[in-house]
Amino acid sequence: RGKISLSAVEEAAEEDGPAAKVARIEPPAAAEEEVNHADEPDEFVCSITHDLMTDPVAATDGHSYERAALEKWLRRSETSPKTGAEMDPRIVPNHALRRAIERWRSTRGSEAN
């Protein structure tokens, strides 16, 4: 995502007068700041956030989600994020999935060294 530069706003105001006080968007930072999700196993990625899970929970729809994302979802909906079917709001930690993700992450970290 681009960032709004305060200096760009100030420069625009100086160059074009008060009517031109608009933020200019800077292009996204270099690619090294972006996270590459291409090599992440699909089952380790939350279908709500599309990010690697760190605190996976199992829901009554049979799927796993990132805890904070599912809790937020359930505050405003009584349906499954994956299927749209009505869903009981009870969730339980998915310890096996968490361990698998941690193992995968540690393996990826050792490959990078």
Image (spheres, rainbow, N blue to C red):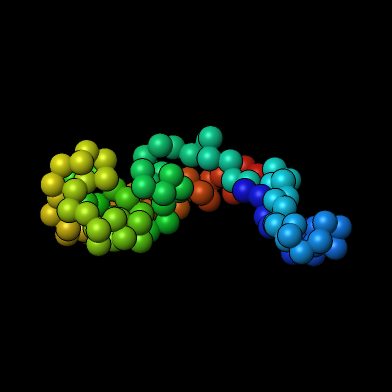
Q: Residue at x 62, y 42 (%)?
A: 111
Viewer-proximal residue, 63 or 72? 72
Residue 99 x %, y %: 38, 53
- The answer to whether residue 101 is seen in the rendering is no
Q: Position of residue 84 (x, y in %)?
A: 20, 41
Q: In the image shown, does 89 or 92 lie closer to the viewer?
A: 89
- Identify the residue at horizontal 36%, vertical 43% (top origin): 47
- At x 72% / y 46%, what residue is drawn? 27
Count of picture labels: 0
Q: State whether residue 42 appears in this view.
A: yes
Query: Above or below — where is 99 with respect to 36?
Result: below
Relative horizontal placement of residue 21, taking residue 50 as reference (left or right): right
Q: Quadrant of residue 70?
A: bottom left
* Residue found 46% across the figure and 47% down from its top: 51
Which of 41 and 22 lies nearest the eye of the viewer?
A: 22
x%, y% of residue 9? 75, 61
Q: Outermost residue, right direction?
A: 15
Q: How far across and how far down the image is residue 29, in percent?
A: 72, 49
**Above-or-below relation of 5 to 39:** below
